[in-house]
Image (cartoon, rainbow, N blue to C red):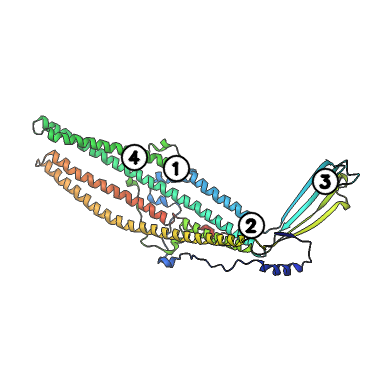
Amino acid sequence: MTLFLKPLTPWLWPGLLCTLVGCGTPGIDVPSQQTTRAQDLRLSEAPSLALPAQWWQSLGDPALDALVTTALQGSPSMATAQLRWQRMQALSGVARAASSVQTSAGADLTRQRFSANGLYPRPIAGNIWDNDTVQANLSWSPDFWGQHAAEFAAAWGQTRAAQADAALARTLLDSQVCKTYITLARLWAQRDLAQRSLTQKQTIHTLITARQSAGLDTSWERNPAEINIAEAQAQWEALQEQIMLVRHQLAALTGQAPQALDALQPKLTSLRLQALPAQLSADLLGRRPEVVASRWRVEAASQDVAVARTQFYPNLNLSAFVGFNALGLSHLLDAGSQQVGITPALRLPLFDGGRLQSQYATRQSERDLAVAQYNQTVLDAVRETADAIGTTQSLHKQMQTQASALHTAEHQYALVQQRFDAGLVNALTVLATQNAVLAQERLYIDLQARQLDNQVQLMKALGGGWQDATATTDQ
């Protein structure tokens, strides 16, 4: 219900408002959820590794650097996140303006014939007149209960959350480009290995065919060799298909045509590992964009609760106007054509069938939901980082073991090669020993790629070099 009152003596307004405050009450606000703190998760207080904004450059591949730069400049997902942030900035500006004095001016020039049987008497009735108005308007809604301040704080919290979302989109994109690039490098290494394996099996087949012609072997030995060649060719073709698909995926991530990267042949040996942290630190929660975004959504939801609380209290709006109105343009600016008015409007909640209570309870539930989502985001962030750190340590040990196995296989192959040079074994024995080397190299390549992929995962888990610049932004 809205009451329109005649102007009152100024000193009567505070007393009237204080009298009306008791018309509605929201009750006591008791949050049902509490945010998770760093100490609850036993995170170290020591500062974590500070990552550079262009962390992918630590992998040491200029071709990868160029792809990430292209992706960040042309990705639709990045543009979408940026536009959402800009939209929230504009909306926060609208919220900020609510507590300001609003002024406007306008002119209304109307020429009309007035009814001879209407409200107006002669000489107006039955004749054509100009009904003209020039007027300035002013309106102001005093923020007695902090509604406008809370609305702006809620909008500002959503703006900061949108900015963190944009940073998250950037981190997800650059890490995905790096992971896809590493996958492509692994496939090329495996393809080269598959080519060597195919060549080796073709050599074995040639030797067996020669021995069969000489009567030393039969088709019993030749048939398995032909099967091995077919399997090696199928494996090589499968790797070719995977390379094509990953190239297309990488082109899509960087906003290019599918065939744009058909000549790209990255090498695992061109990528390097670097030392990474072995423990989780408390500042992780301020470096993960999704954690920061969730925290600001909790703040925004808390301010929405404050806004809902103010709806129980009286709301005053003041408006005024000054200008000229006259029948006939020639008299518009005459002194007698002046008009001045003031309109105080008081909104007083009396009986609403429980609407305000329900609205208030809804905002409280939304705040508690935001807190629960923030806590889940924190747990996921800590788990993901702990997983990446643990995997880093495990892969280091696996790599040491695999390097030892590869060295042993290569040493065994060298010994057999020496025996072949001395005429103690035949070429088939040498080629069979080479199979073990190829198998160990295949495992080594996979572990090498997993190490690089996990390094990217850990970089992402540590926030991708992002810092919450909004922490010091002036509202």
Task: Tell me where residue 329 appears, x and y as whole percent.
Answer: 86, 44
Instruction: Determine which residue is flagged by label 2.
Output: 96
C-alpha distance separating marks 3 and 2 = 35 Å
Where disc 1 sits, the SS reads: loop
The crowd level at tag 2 (other Cα within 10 Å; few <14, some 14-19, many 20+) is some
Depth check: give the residue in front, 54 or 341.
341
Instruction: Determine which residue is flagged by label 1.
Output: 254
Q: What's under tag 3, amino acid-wise?
A: Asp
Task: Tell me where residue 297 appears, x and y as whole percent.
Answer: 52, 58
Question: Left or right: where does residue 101 sit relative to residue 233?
Answer: right
C-alpha distance separating marks 2 and 1 = 38 Å
Q: Looking at the image, do the residues carrying marks 4 and 3 touch, with CB atoms under 8 Å apart?
A: no
Instruction: Determine which residue is flagged by label 3.
Output: 132
**Residue 257 in sight from this viewpoint:** yes
Question: Left or right: where does residue 324 sit relative to residue 283?
Answer: right
Q: Looking at the image, do the residues carrying marks 1 and 3 touch, with CB atoms under 8 Å apart?
A: no
Screen quadrant of the N terminus: bottom right
Instruction: Determine which residue is flagged by label 4.
Output: 242
Q: Residue furthest front?
A: 353
Q: Is residue 20 above or below residue 176?
A: below
